[in-house]
Image (cartoon, rainbow, N blue to C red):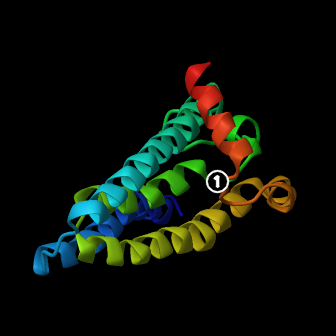
Amino acid sequence: MFKLNKITKVWKFFYWPVVWLIVYVPAFVRPVYLYGFQKTIALVFGLILIGISLLLTSAGGRTLAQKGHQKDHKTLWPDKFIEFGIFNCMRHPMHLGLAIFPVALALISGSVPAILSSGWGVSGALWFVLQIEEKDALNKYGMVYSAYMQKVPPFSLRLRCIKSLIKSKNG
């Protein structure tokens, strides 16, 4: 079981760079770029999304690093259930940030193939969270996590969540 658990964690770690690579491969095969006003609009939206992405990943990571471990815990992976801070607003803030990141970079780059293929990256990321991460969390935390799933959505960009992110960054 230990070996299988270790393989799963390694696979989870490398999943994200593979998804991001798939998003950008079409940009290298057929480099077509936005120009003029379209490029400016894409750049503005890309910068907004990258800010949100960084806020999501940092708030989630900071909360898990500070509160997601038992005292004798020695690995990167959290072993304590968290449902406060940004986790009171959504179950997977870091994963949402990781899913948004390639879209933001594609928009900033202005590469049409990267922008078009970034939807596949988001789809792959959301599938990963809902099919892999959710099952792992249910196995790890059981009924507590099941009740949490009933109250809190997996992802959210509601204004309340964004305000919570900004407050956690400033506070």
* Amino acid type of the residue that numbered disc 1 sits on in the rendered structure: Leu
Residue at which label 1 appears: 157
Residue 36 in the figure: left or right of residue 67: left
Q: At x 68% / y 58%, what residue is drawn?
A: 137
**Quadrant of the rendered image containing residue 167:** top right
Q: Nearer the viewer, residue 155 or 141?
A: 155
**Residue furthest top as drawn:** 171
**Residue furthest front as drawn:** 37
Q: At x 46% / y 61%, what residue is drawn?
A: 99
Question: Which quadrant of the rendered structure holds the N terminus?
Answer: bottom right
Q: Is residue 113 above or below residue 43?
A: below
Q: What x and y, as percent, mark residue 12?
A: 44, 61
Q: What x and y, as percent, mark residue 149?
A: 80, 60
Q: Is residue 104 above or below residue 29?
A: above
Residue 134 in the figure: left or right of residue 4: right
Residue 86 in the figure: left or right of residue 73: right
Q: How many numbered tags mark residues here?
A: 1
**Quadrant of the rendered image containing residue 13:** bottom left
Estimate how packed mark 1 is, as few (under 14), some (14 to 19) or many (20 or more) residues with alpha carbons within 10 Å: some
Q: Secondary structure at mark 1?
A: loop
Question: Which quadrant of the rendered structure holds the C terminus?
Answer: top right
